[in-house]
Image: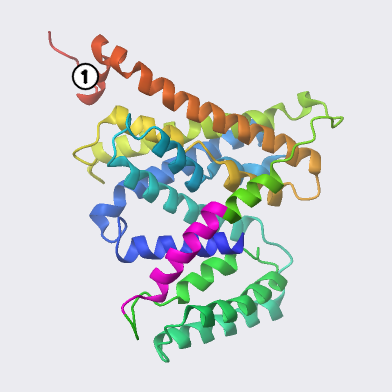
Amino acid sequence: MAIFFLLAGLEIKHEVLHGNLSSVKKATFPVIAACGGVIVPAIIFFYFNYKTKFINGIGVPISTDIAFAVGIFMLLKNKLNPSLKVFLLSLAVVDDLISIIVIGIAYSSNLNLVGIIGAVVVLSILMFMNKVLKINKSYLYLMVGAALWYFVYISGVHSTISGVLLSLAIPSKAYKGDVSVLDKLLDKLGPLCNYFILPLFAFSNTAINLNVSLDYGQVDKMMLGIMVGLVLGKPVGIMLFTYIGTKLHLTEKPKDCRWISLLEVSMLAGIGFTMSIFVAEIAFEGSSQLIDVAKISILMAAVLSASLTYMTITLKPVLSKSGVLKYLHSGGNRIRQ
C-alpha cells in the first residue's frame, strides 16, 4: 500500500499546486467538507466505544475509498451533478491526507532513532536530487524511495508514510523535458493502483471467516460505531460543516451545486472499503476476529451508502413536488404561498 499512498501524496501535491486546492477560495469548501466528514464519524465511533477496548478503531470510519466512491459516481453520473465529481475527488484527497496523518500519529509505536535519522537523511538526498541536481528521471526517485521505505519501516512509523514523504520530494516542474516527474508518476501509478494494487488488496483482504466463535453482542458497539460513522456520520458531517461554513461566510458553495446534489455525493463518502479495511487491520492488528467484524461492518456500510445514494436520487422528484427541496434550497426560510 506504500505505492498507493505515494499516489495519494502525488494527487494531493498536484491539487495544491495546480488543482482545486491551489487557492484559498477553491480549497475551503472541500477542506471544510472533509473536516466534517472526519470529525463527525470519529465522534460517533467515540460515543459508542469510549468505554470499550475497541476505541483504537476510531480511525476506521473516517476514511473514504477514492476509487470505489468515484466508481459508483461514474455509474450514476447521468443522475448526478457532473461538476460534483471534482468536489468528490477534492474531498477524498483531503480525506486521505487526514487519514495519513492519523495513521502516522495514532498507529505508530516503539520509535527507532536510527530508522528516523536514516529516513531524514534519505529524504534530504531526494530533496537534493530535486532542488539542486534537478534530476528528471522518475526511476531514480523510486530507487532512492525504496531506501526511504526501509528506514521508515524500521523506524516504527507506519511504512506507508514513506510513500507520502517520497511524494514531497518529487519534482513538480519539468527540468529536462516537457513532462514533470510528478505528471509522469501520476500517469503511470494511477492505472497501476486503480486496476491492480487496490483490487489485489481488496481481493486478498476482504476474506471473512463467518464461522468464528464470537459473541456479536460483545462487538455490537464497534459495529455500530463503524457503520453509523460511515453511513450517517460522513454525509451529516459534510453537510453540517459546509452549511455552517457558508452561513458564517467561511466558504462559498459552488454556484451550480444544490444542497440535495451535495447530499447525494456526500453519501458516497461513506464508502470506506479498502482504506477503512487498511486502517482496521492496523488498529486491530493481532486479532483476526476483530478485523473480520470490522470488515463486515465496512462492507455493509459501503452497500448501505451506495443504496442510500440511489434512493435519494430516486426520491428527488417526489421531494421536489412536495416542496421539501425548495425549503432546503431557500436556506431553511419558510416558503410563502
Query: What residue did someone put label 1 on?
Result: 326
User: Foreground: 203 or 302?
Assistant: 203
Which residues make up the magenta segment?
178-195
Q: Quadrant of the N terminus?
A: bottom right
Image x and y of residue 74, in percent? 40, 39
Q: Quadrant of the C terminus?
A: top left
Looking at the image, residue 299 lies above or below residue 70: above
Looking at the image, residue 214 lies above or below residue 327: below
Amino acid type indicated by mark 1: Lys
The crowd level at tag 1 (other Cα within 10 Å; few <14, some 14-19, many 20+) is some
Magenta span includes 179: yes
Image x and y of residue 136, in percent? 42, 83
Name the image quarter holding residue 316.
top left
User: Image check: 64 left or right of 182?
Assistant: right
Query: How would you classify the magenta stretch by its main secondary structure?
Result: helix
The total of numbered circles placed on residues is 1
Q: Residue at x 58, y 65 (%)?
A: 161
Q: Residue at x 52, y 79 (%)?
A: 139
Q: Residue at x 68, y 29 (%)?
A: 221
Q: Residue furthest left?
A: 337
Image x and y of residue 320, in percent? 25, 16
Name the image quarter holding residue 61.
top right
